[in-house]
Each structure stands twice: as C-alpha cells, then as structure tokens.
Amino acid sequence: MKTIRRLIYREVIAAVLFVTVGFLALFFFFDLVDELPNVGRGMTGYRLTQAFMYVALMVPSHLYELLPIAVLIGTIFVMARLAQSSEYTILRTSGLGPWRAMRTLLFLGLAFAAATFAAGDYLAPAADRTAQLLKARLEGRISVGQTGAWLKERQSFHTYNVNVGSLSPDGDMQSIRIYEADAKGYLVSITQAARGRFADDGSWVLENAERSEFSSAGPDTPKVDRVRMPSYRWPTEITQEMVSVALLKPERMGTLDLFQYIRHLEANGQTSQRYEIEFWRKVFYPLSCTVMVVLALPFAYLHFRSGGITGYVFGGVLLGISFFLLNNVFGYIGNLQNWRPWLTAAAPAVIYTMFSLGAFGWLVLRR
C-alpha cells in the first residue's frame, strides 16, 4: 500500500502544482495589465519594476483563494486519467478499496488544507501589508473608502468614536477626528489633528491638535471652548494593529487578528457580523481542500471513451468555480440576512460534502 500511496500522492501533487502555477501565472498577467496604466504616475513615479513587485506581492492572496480549486481540478485530472488508462482498475485489484482510497485522499487533502491555512494566515496578510506600504510610498497614504476607518472605544464614563483617514508609509495616522460623548450620549468634545503617532505606552500623540469642548454655562446657554495644542496625548487602548486592521479588507486579515478585532468590537458595542463571517470562513475555507479530494474520487470509477477525459476535467473546473462563487454569495447573503456567522461560513463546504458523499455512494458503493 505504501507504493500505491506514493503513486497517488506523487501524481496528485504534481497535477495540483501544475494547475496552481497556471492559475497564478494567469492572475499575475491580469494584475499586471491592470497596473500598467499606473506606470509613470504618482509623486515619485511608478516604475515598471515597482509594478512587477506589487503584482508579485498579490500572488500569496491568489494562492490562498485558488488552492482548493486547484486541488479539485488536479485530483479530478489524476483520477480520470488513471481510470481512462485502466491503471485504477489494477490498483483496485491490488487491494485499493473505496474506503481505503478515500482515506488516502483525505490525508492528502489535510496536507493541502494545512498549506492553504499557512498561505491565508501568514503569507497573504504579510504580503498584502507590504504591497499596501509599497502603494503608500507612491500615493502618500493607506486608506479605505472616502472616510477612512471608524473605531469605537468605551472608557470609564465616556464613549469615543474615532475616525482615522489614512496611514502614512511610516505608520503615522493622518486626518484624525475623535468624538467624545458622555454616559447619556451627549457630545462633550471634538478633537481634530492632521497627523498623529502611536506612543510607546499605547497612547496617541496628536500633532497641532484642535480641541472643541461643549459645555453649558446655564440652562439655556451653551458654551464652546476651542483650544489649539502643539501636542496632545490621548490615552486609549486602540492599538496600531487595530487601526491597520480597520484599514485593510477583512479577507486579508489573519485569523488571530480577526478574533482580536471582533473582541474589541463586541466590547465596545459595535456590530461584528461581517468580521465574524470572515473569521469562520478563515476557519472552514482550508478544510474545503478535503471536500475537493472526496468530490474528485468518484471520477476514478467512471468509464471513459477515447478523449472523454477533457469533458470531465472541464466539469471539475466548473465545480471549482461554482464553489468559489457560492462561498462568496453565502458571505454576502449571511451578512445581509444576519445569519449565524459559523453557519454562513460552513454552508458551502457542507453542501459540497453532501454532494460528494452522494456521488461517492452512487458511483462507488452501488457498483
């Protein structure tokens, strides 16, 4: 059985690597075409070498997204080719039963799941942050949308709503606004600064800050005091990582970063539905590699005519694309309908698992 396992592992790994390299080369080309119009623009001049570097840094993100699809296509190709050449029939007569074949592929699927987790939790976030910093050196900032990132913090008696417009390439904050409200929800003060940095003790140091304090001298006499300060220190538990997370897309965060950010949102009474869905997707998405290898196993029990393997591989491509689309659609629908985050993230994998087990039972166990 060791020889049979080595044969299957070698063939599947080679096929998956070939498909993965092909997909990554295709996406690299598309990303490069999108970046070419920006070459020569920017304050420092966007050179072709920088465009190549930026596109190369996006490869780990594509690897994380495409690896389950590549596992499905590569495994279907190997299983179908073994069936077409009658090699799988010989393996079955050598003792490779259906359940043993499934266990063999499941171990391989777990290895691919570990690789997917490593790519999505370590390689992709680090490469994406580096790519954003590279863009920031050319555009002058890292920002999301038109208003930047919004964060909220509750302290002893007051609540603070904080807006950070962007982050500079050296990690400083730009366009900072802090809205302070009392326990009843009344606005107490507004602090604004064009620039700020993170101090070693965790507080924020705002440069050339303007603070407006709202008070009442009498029952019908509102009062506004404005103060300009060259430096203003604001004690807070909002760290640089939280600001960076808020300025990045949730799907580009690591699992631990998402978990910590969700806890911060819940502690401050903010909705965390979107980030909880992404967290559970981070948990379940690597496991989809095991679903894909099980889905590919029934192809080894089909009977092919000459040249019929191409159609089945094309069917595998469509299955992989449908899984990717269903995974994204469930994320959007779950966020809109306020479904349970873990159920929203697990639903596509559960649906494809039931489909693969049904196909396995019909094509393998009944024949």
Image (cartoon, helix red, strand yellow):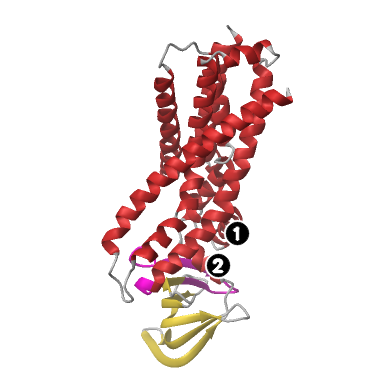
Estimate the x, y position of residue 128 in percent, counting from the top left: 48, 59
Q: Is residue 1 above or below residue 90?
A: below
Q: Residues within 10 Å of mark 1 (few under 14, many from 20)?
A: few
Give, as a single range, the part of the protein colored magenta: 138-161
Disc 2 and disc 1 in contact, CB within 8 angstroms: yes
For label 2, the residue is 241
Looking at the image, is mark 2 or mark 1 earlier in the sequence? 2
Tell whether 14 sits left or right of 227. Answer: right
Q: Can residue 344 be seen in this view?
A: no
Tell whether 352 sits left or right of 259. Answer: left
Q: Which of marks 2 and 1 is in front?
A: 2
Q: Is residue 353 above or below residue 196?
A: above
Residue at left offset 58%, top offset 35%: 13
C-alpha distance separating marks 2 and 1:
10 Å
State the mark number for residue 260.
Answer: 1
Farthest residue, direction right = 2
The image quadrant that residue 293 belongs to is top right
